[in-house]
Image: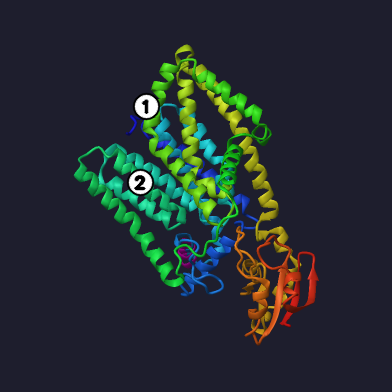
Amino acid sequence: MGQNYPIAFSMKNKLIFFFFALLGVILILLSTSRYGAGLSYDSVGYISTARNIIIGAGLTLYNGSPLIEQPPLFPIILALAGGIFRIDPLILANIVNALVYGLILYFGGLLIFKYLSSFPVFVLIGTLAIFASIPLFTVSVMAWSEPLFILFVILSLLFANSYLEKNDLISLTLLSLSIVLSTLTRYIGVVQILWGAFIITVFYRDSLKNKIAHLSLFTFISVLPIGIWLIRNYYISNTLFGHRAPSIYTLAQNLILVFNDLMTWYIPGIIADHRPTLILLGVVIGFIAGLNPKDSWQSMKVRLRQISPIVLFVVVYITFLVISSTTAAYDQIGDRLLSPIYVPLTLFLLILAQILIEQYRRYFSNKVMNTFLLITLVIWLVYPIRSITITAVNLAKIGQGYSSKAWEESNTIKYLLQHQTLESECTIYTNAPDAVYILAHLVTKMIPAKKFYNSQKVMYDISWLKNVWLVDNNKKCIIIFYKVNREYLFAIDELQTVASINLIAHFDDGAIYSIAKK
């Protein structure tokens, strides 16, 4: 299965990849230098859990509930870094992800080198493509676990390549451990267990007895840690991954989302949105590929056999993502959820391009072909480089999510910071408890939800809410209501039908109300 690499991975290669890694670290740090890593609902969960680990409160969120909807590795790493350097995990988040982004560039470049070392131009362009990747940059400037997960995916692909070359226990153990770390970073990492088991079953070349032994060892190592975590989840909440409602997205909608998002990674929007142009481009490429079909198909079959683990990972990941997003409600498919396949998918496309070009090398000198390839691929990279440059400049100017200029200048937040005694004096409800915690340092309760997130399933009916909400609360209650898009929660006018609500203060970005049972 392994490929014979005519060019050794020399110190020169290591320095080149290290240079790209260093540039990546600098890019993330510059983009987040003013406002820090971008913050979202998940980000606040990770950071609050890391803070609680540091103070000895365990794997719990800011509101005291146990961490269940996400695996524990990312907040544990934030907590370890925060504990060692005595720095708030909120401040460390962008530094951690900048370093992880650098490692993604280094090992991603190494993975491309493994398969394309005979074609230095492709190795260079592939590494540049990772550096200029829209999805990888997008997730790395946020306090999310995706960058760490992507790093473990790349490592697992490297160790899988090594295992298929050597079939030794060291490579198998490293493959198993990289998959363990991926499952403890994001739940979708469980697809790698299936992927790894398939690779061992299909491609292991020794005796059946040894194949069974390797498969058993791999399964034991990769399943045990995440299995223990899921048992813990079930013991605490009677669920494995938290409560999940049916999704609002159909299978067809999710397939379209995947296709459209992948197009934006590699093709400018003006072309991606013009389907006839895409069809014409596909016809032209197909025609060129068919000019020498015998050599082309023979070469392609050999190369595809070599990269089958990478292709298999992309297929399995997308399939699992689409099916799970169709059956369970979570974030809409986009750059964030698809980002783990960017490196293997880009490598696959580069290999296809190399196969396409290789058959014409007999007609032109290497210098002419390399110059043509370099110019063509650099032009192709202009679009993603321009895109991330614009994004980086905007991030440095205004930030993203809760760590943005808009939230920093929020008058509602300023009011809460000036009235810190509210937490002890009142029961506080809000439609943005994550924002209130991370910006105003107050622990609040979520306004009742009428539906589950990204689902049509009803959580609370308004008539039922009338009989249970605020019934046992003897403290003064207030609502902090922001102008945020969380339509699955009850709005103020809906809550007024079951409670007496009066305005206390009104701001451009939100309002504060007193509330009492009718």
Q: Main secondary structure of the magenta part?
A: helix
Camera-nearest residue between 26 and 66:
66
Identify the magenta region. 76-84
Residue 425 against residue 223 in the figure, above or below: below
Q: Which residue is mark 2?
A: 196
Camera-nearest residue between 211 and 370:
211
In the image, taking residue 400 as reference, residue 91 lies left or right, namely left
Q: What sort of colour scheme is used for the picture? A: rainbow
Q: Residue at x 66, y 86 (%)?
A: 475
Question: In the drawing, what numbered circle is on residue 302?
Answer: 1
**What amino acid is found at the position of numbered circle 1 in the picture?**
Val
Secondary structure under tag 1 reads helix
Camera-nearest residue between 437 and 183:
183
Labels in figure, total: 2
| Quadrant including the C terminus | bottom right
Q: Residue 271: percent from the left, percent from the top?
A: 66, 32
Q: Residues within 10 Å of mark 2 (few under 14, many from 20)?
A: many
Quick one: which residue is furthest to the bottom in this view? 474
Q: Residue at x 55, y 65 (%)?
A: 45
Q: CA distance from mark 2 to mark 1?
A: 21 Å
**What amino acid is found at the position of numbered circle 2 in the picture?**
Gly
